[in-house]
Amino acid sequence: MDIIQAKKVRDEERRRIARSLHDGPIQSMTNIIWAAGICEQLMEIDLSKAKKELGKLKQLARNALRELCDAVSELRDAGMKEGGLTAALAEYSNSLQAAGVRRIRYCVKGQESKIPSGTEGCLRAIAQECCTNIRKHAKASNVIITLRYTPRTLFLYIRDDGIGFDNPQDGIGSGELHKFGLLGIAEQVGLINGKMKIKSSLGKGTRILVAAPLRQASSELREQEGK
Ligand SMILES: Nc1ncnc2c1ncn2[C@@H]1O[C@H](COP(=O)(O)OP(=O)(O)OP(=O)(O)O)[C@@H](O)[C@H]1O
Ligand SMILES: [Mg+2]
């Protein structure tokens, strides 16, 4: 492929991504703003209807988050086909050095296998947020990041020995202004039908474990075939 052809392919890819952002998340955000306006009006006249509309608004926001995750993973896939999640995690863990973490251990365990692309995008975003939190808040000396493949589930385990924080589960539900990281992680884990555990206490560091289903679709298919 010559330079002109390569540029044409890149331009077309850019236009395609812009189109899918426009039809997906941008459209959804417009709907969310519109729905928020309706909720505001209903609050004055009918609280139970307002509550119902808020439920719809939440669903709209979830859809927008899913679309954004898909768009981000599409963009990342385009720029980083080689290495995938393993390489991305290595990059995030390297970024911790600049924040003064002395020892960073990153290991991949089990037999690596194909990860559904939505799941891969979410796990990258989750790992990135965890590493950002370690840089911003933890004051940790040691960090261990483990990616463990089992036949049905991929586990991401991120552990630091920093200052920790109180009541991590409350932190997720508090909706405190300007604190969306842990909330975002919980939402993304929900999107991929995963499970997560956060353990943290003051002075004792933080552990975050995410379990993402790997083989759900194919195992369900096998179960169906066996019937
Ligand atoms: N690894 C960690 N070590 C110590 N404290 C943490 C860690 N991760 C999170 N926290 C605490 O939990 C709070 C909530 O984290 P969260 O990621 O939701 O918000 P944030 O990082 O403050 O803001 P945002 O992610 O929206 O930029 C943080 O403000 C911090 O007090
Ligand atoms: Mg954060």
Image (cartoon, rainbow, N blue to C red):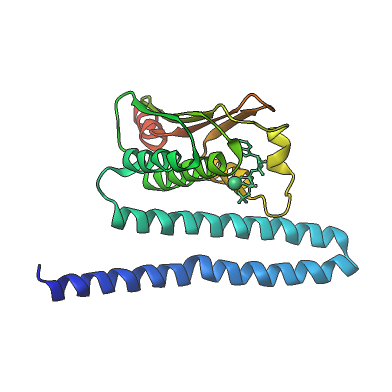
Q: Residue 108, position in %: x, y? A: 34, 28
Q: Residue 213, position in %: x, y? A: 44, 33
From the viewer's perspective, tell me whether residue 70 is left or right of residue 209. Answer: left
Q: Residue 124, position in %: x, y? A: 43, 44
Q: Vertically, is 48 above or below 108?
A: below
Decide which of 20, 10 is in the foreground and name it. Answer: 10
Residue beneath the point at 45% across and 30% down: 102
Residue beneath the point at 58% across and 35% down: 139
Q: Residue 158, position in %: x, y? A: 50, 31
Which residue, as the protein is rendered here, is positioned at the far left? 2
Residue beneath the point at 40% across and 71% down: 18
Q: Vertically, is 117 above or below 153?
A: below
Which residue, as the protein is rendered here, is positioned at the far right? 45
Q: Does the rendering let one see residue 146?
A: no
Quadrant holding ligand 1? Answer: top right
Tell me the quadrant of the picture where the N terminus can be found. Answer: bottom left
Q: Vertically, is 21 above or below 177?
A: below
Q: Does the rendering let one see residue 218?
A: yes
Tell me the quadrant of the picture where the C terminus can be found. Answer: top left
Q: How many marks?
A: 0
Decide which of 215, 40 is in the foreground and name it. Answer: 40
From the viewer's perspective, tell me whether residue 7 is left or right of residue 54. Answer: left
From the viewer's perspective, tell me whether residue 200 is left or right of residue 78. Answer: right
Q: Quadrant of residue 154?
A: top left
